[in-house]
Image (cartoon, grey):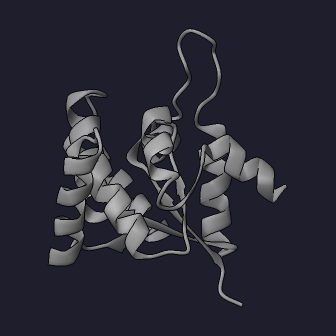
Amino acid sequence: MEPERIFLDTDVVVNWLVRETESASGKELWKAPYEIVKLAEQQTVSALISLTTLMEIRYLLRRKKFFDTPQIEADLARVSAVFDVIIPDEISLLRANTLQTEHPLDPFDALHLSFAAGVKPVTLISRDADFIKIARSFVETATPEEFFKSRS
């Protein structure tokens, strides 16, 4: 039997990489993503991200988290070792453009939803409530905590 496929949104991967904690509540945002990464490492799930996710992570780590280039590239190598990376094709890009035309999605979310819809069955894992609300019409969705709790 093939492992369940999951597609992680950028925010979830960044939570794991930087061991992010919510400043207002102190909630450790990285814990559920860490557990999901462990499932992927054990090949209990097949974890997917896109090349555009890697690019977005590089941008965020450089510009928002102020990581240096060697650390960023080491982190991206860790990500690439755990996740299968989807390379955008023409159909995915056109579908993303249509999704963005029809829904209030930023370019990355439109791409991620396009990729996830193209590899169904898949569960899209994100923390972005607005994105989840839209994506739910196309694929199964969950927050990291919801996904991990459903597996326990």
Q: Residue furthest top?
A: 24
Compared to residue 78, the image places residue 11 above or below, namely above
Question: Which of 36 and 19 lies nearest the eye of the viewer?
Answer: 36
Residue 89, can we see it? no
Q: Residue at x 16, y 67 (%)?
A: 94
What is the x, y in percent for residue 69? Answer: 20, 44
Q: Residue at x 50, y 34 (%)?
A: 129
Compared to residue 67, the image places residue 111 above or below, namely below
Residue 32, can we see it? yes
What is the x, y in percent for residue 138? Answer: 47, 60
Name the side, left or right, on which 2 lies relative to 23: right
Q: Which quarter shows the N terminus?
A: bottom right
Q: Which quarter shows the C terminus?
A: bottom right
Q: Residue at x 44, y 76 (%)?
A: 119
Question: Which of 8 and 104 lies nearest the eye of the viewer?
Answer: 104
Q: Residue at x 54, y 69 (%)?
A: 122
Name the quadrant containing residue 103: top left
Compared to residue 65, the image places residue 102 above or below, namely below
Name the side, left or right, on which 36 lies relative to 56: right
What is the x, y in percent for residue 124? Answer: 51, 57
Compared to residue 147, the image places residue 3 above or below, namely below
Name the quadrant containing residue 53: bottom left
Question: Which of 54 and 128 lies nearest the eye of the viewer?
Answer: 128
